[in-house]
Image (tube, rainbow, N blue to C red):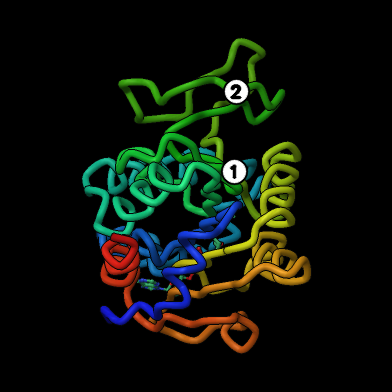
Amino acid sequence: MNDIPGELVERLRDCRRLVIFTGAGVSAESGIPTFRDAQTGLWAKYSPEQLASPEGFRQEPQTVWDWYAWRRERCLAVQPNPAHRAIAELQRRLPHATLITQNVDGLHQRAGSASALELHGNIHRLKCFRCGENSGAWPDDCSAPPLHSCGGLLRPAVVWFGENLDHEVLEAAWRAAEEADLFFSIGTSSLVYPAADLPFLAQRNGCYVVEVNPQPTPLSAHANLCLNGAAGVVMPAVVAALG
Ligand code: OAD
């Protein structure tokens, strides 16, 4: 997929506010399994709700902790791919670009993205399950959830089923989508709300929406342009076409 339409290149050159919105598909080529694919082998007997919900952590904190420790190890073991690097390059070249991600793996930052609105948090940080206070990085010994100074257990600082997104991050994402004149939705199934609303919100405000995904999604029929390919191929081609 190397054919980037000239109209898109013109729009990129002329755009005043760009939003790049990403999902698990952007990290697929790095070898990070998508959320549901991650429930294989050892974890196949657990449902997503058991492993990623406040109820699950309350009932089995050690199991949930172990699952996240395993996922975090995977995130640290892999490298950013050409899609992450092309997105970071777009941010450098287009000063009014906002990156909004649903991914918790930190790969955008490792690829050089200076800023990202992390809608679903970040697996590399911890917060207190009881009082909610942010508590920085994981300890060297990851064998069990550590205690916070308030006496609560620490947990990964990611959004779980049944939890609200961080209000300030969501507000900033809404604002960026409302103001955008060009919006890329890359590697997301467009199924998980409220994140999935962002391209529609942008489009209601007159924005040109581009989807990058090898598979159709509920957004495909509405997007102004669908680039049907892997993000690691399409996004470097977009940067190359920009010249
Ligand atoms: P999904 O796993 O739902 O969807 C991944 C999308 O990436 C699919 O549409 C694939 O077709 C596409 N895809 C796969 N390989 C790709 C590639 N190489 N290039 C481009 N696209 C590719 O992931 P998300 O949409 O991110 O939430 O899921 C959203 C949220 O659902 C996640 O953030 C997580 C999960 O429940 C929380 O953890 C709160």
User: Residue visible at 51% across and 67% down?
Assistant: 11
Q: Which secondary structure lies at badge 2?
A: strand
Query: Considering only vertical position in the picture, is 215 above or below 183?
Result: below
**Where residue 58 sits in the image (x, y, percent)?**
64, 41
Of callouts 2 and 1, the N-terminal one = 1
Discs 2, 1 touching: Cβ within 8 Å: no
**Where residue 60 sits in the image (x, y, percent)?**
55, 44
Q: Which residue is mark 2?
A: 134
Foreground: 23 or 77? 23
Badge number at residue 123:
none
Q: Classify mark 1 as within 8 Å of ligand 1 or not, answering yes or no.
A: no
User: Residue visible at 39% across and 51% down?
Assistant: 90
Relative to residue 77, is residue 144 drawn left or right?
right
User: Residue visible at 43% across and 84% down?
Assistant: 215
Relative to residue 187, is residue 40 drawn left or right?
left
Evaluate whether residue 236 shows in this view.
yes
Among the 4 quarters of the image, the one containing residue 34 = bottom left
Among the 4 quarters of the image, the one containing residue 77 = top left
Q: Disc 2 versus disc 1: distance between alpha carbons?
A: 17 Å
Evaluate whether residue 51 shows in this view.
no
Residue found at the very far top of the displayed protein: 149
Query: Considering only vertical position in the picture, is 154 above or below 2?
Result: above
Q: Which secondary structure lies at badge 1?
A: helix
Query: Which quadrant holds the N terminus?
Result: bottom left
Badge number at residue 57:
1
Q: Label 2 neighbourhood size at 10 Å, few (<14), some (14-19), many (20+)?
A: some
The residue under label 2 is which amino acid type?
A: Asn
**Where residue 6 sits in the image (x, y, percent)?**
40, 78
Query: Considering only vertical position in the picture, is 100 above or below 237?
Result: above
Among the 4 quarters of the image, the one containing residue 228 = bottom left
The residue under label 1 is which amino acid type?
A: Phe
Q: Mark 2 or 1, which is nearer the eye?
A: 2
